[in-house]
Image: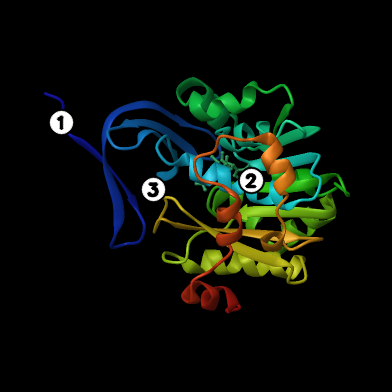
Amino acid sequence: MNPEFWFTEKYSETCGFTFKVKEVLQTKTSKFQRLDILDTYDFGRVMLLDGLVMLTEKDEFVYHEMITNVPLFAHPNPKDVLVIGGGDGGTVRELSKHTYLNSITEVEIDDIVVKGAKEFMMFVGCGYDNKKVNLIIGDGIEFVKDKKSAYDVIIVDSTDPFGPAEGLFSGEFYSNVKNALRENGFVVAQAENPYYDTKWMMRSVNNMRKAFENSVECYLAYIPTYPSGMWNFAIGYKGVKPSKSFDSGRYNKLGLKLKYYNEKIHRACFALPEFVKELLDKNV
Ligand code: SAM
């Protein structure tokens, strides 16, 4: 009889998130990180990087719809989009639904993530089937350094601020991102959660605020398999405020069949609880 295998992601030294694993489908190590792909009873297929849940088959739609559609429908006329990270393919899958885009470029540092998603998680790996997606294996921090007014939207779909992703949360990186954006451009970044290790959320938002001269808003989405379930995104803008802008004409014309995002969510997700506002106003 097989012994039971339970996986725990530690949220702190004293608490974590535990689920039972059916099967380990792949384990690989690159010079950047360790990748595990699991099959589970409750969440379907699950991708871990260095023991942290990146996505699950059950709730990845929330994260990927929210990191893409909020900046795209807030922008008056997006044409060229850059994704940094996002090697599982979920973000480019959502971008591919925006058929009016001219180009979708993704810079992912680690090809084991892309290969793993294509082999075991085609529900996100299918993002690479779109011919418009130009995948570059490289460091996103270096990639943006010399780019000037090249993109309308930049999406930072990164791991947590450790190892190769640490610099993706820095002020210098956000300044380079600002230069890489055109007029009316947006950068959106996954920006951690307001319950565990809150300094990461506070620091990344503060660094973005410095680079964008305070033109930054935050929005929340509810993702059960991420620490605390409440996930924060930070969006820096060079033109209109994303909370006040929604292109209903383009939204209705596209007629997307989505599972989380809609016009009311676009407007409501910028409403922040008092304790979150308080944390975000602290300078760390
Ligand atoms: N949704 C996920 C989350 O928040 O848990 C993030 C998913 S995606 C798998 C994150 C990707 O960022 C990883 O594949 C990782 O290799 C990539 N990454 C980390 N640092 C990077 C860098 N400096 N340049 C490009 N990609 C990077």
Whether residues under marks 1 and 2 lie with C-beta atoms below 8 angstroms apart, the answer is no
**Residue drawn at (73%, 58%) of the image:** 174
Q: Quadrant of residue 90?
A: top right
**Residue drawn at (55%, 54%) of the image:** 265
Placement of 164 over or under 209, stated as above or below: above
Whether residues under marks 3 and 2 lie with C-beta atoms below 8 angstroms apart, the answer is no
Q: Which residue is mark 1?
A: 3
Q: Dot 3: within a 10 Å radius of its alpha carbon, few (fewer than 14), some, or many (20 or more) residues?
A: many
Earlier in the chain: of badge 1 and badge 2, it is: 1
Q: Which residue is mark 3?
A: 225
Say whether residue 133 is left or right of residue 42.
right
Q: Quadrant of residue 21?
A: top left
Residue 236 x, y percent position in the rendering: 71, 60
Mark pair 3, 1: CA separation: 24 Å
Q: Nearer the viewer, residue 270 or 36?
A: 270
The answer to whether any part of residue 138 appears in the image is no
Mark pair 1, 2: CA separation: 43 Å
Q: Quadrant of residue 135?
A: top right
Residue 283 x, y percent position in the rendering: 61, 78
**Residue drawn at (60%, 55%) of the image:** 266
Mark pair 3, 2: CA separation: 21 Å
Nearer the camera: disc 3 or disc 1 = 3
- State which quarter of the image contains the N terminus: top left
- Which amino acid lies under the numbered mark 2 shown in the image of this protein? Asn
**Residue drawn at (80%, 57%) of the image:** 178
Quadrant where ligand 1 appears: top right
Q: Dot 1: within a 10 Å radius of its alpha carbon, few (fewer than 14), some, or many (20 or more) residues?
A: few
The answer to whether any part of residue 108 appears in the image is yes
Residue 52 x, y percent position in the rendering: 42, 46
Secondary structure of the residue carrying tag 1 is loop
Nearer the camera: disc 1 or disc 2 = 2
Q: Which residue is mark 2?
A: 69
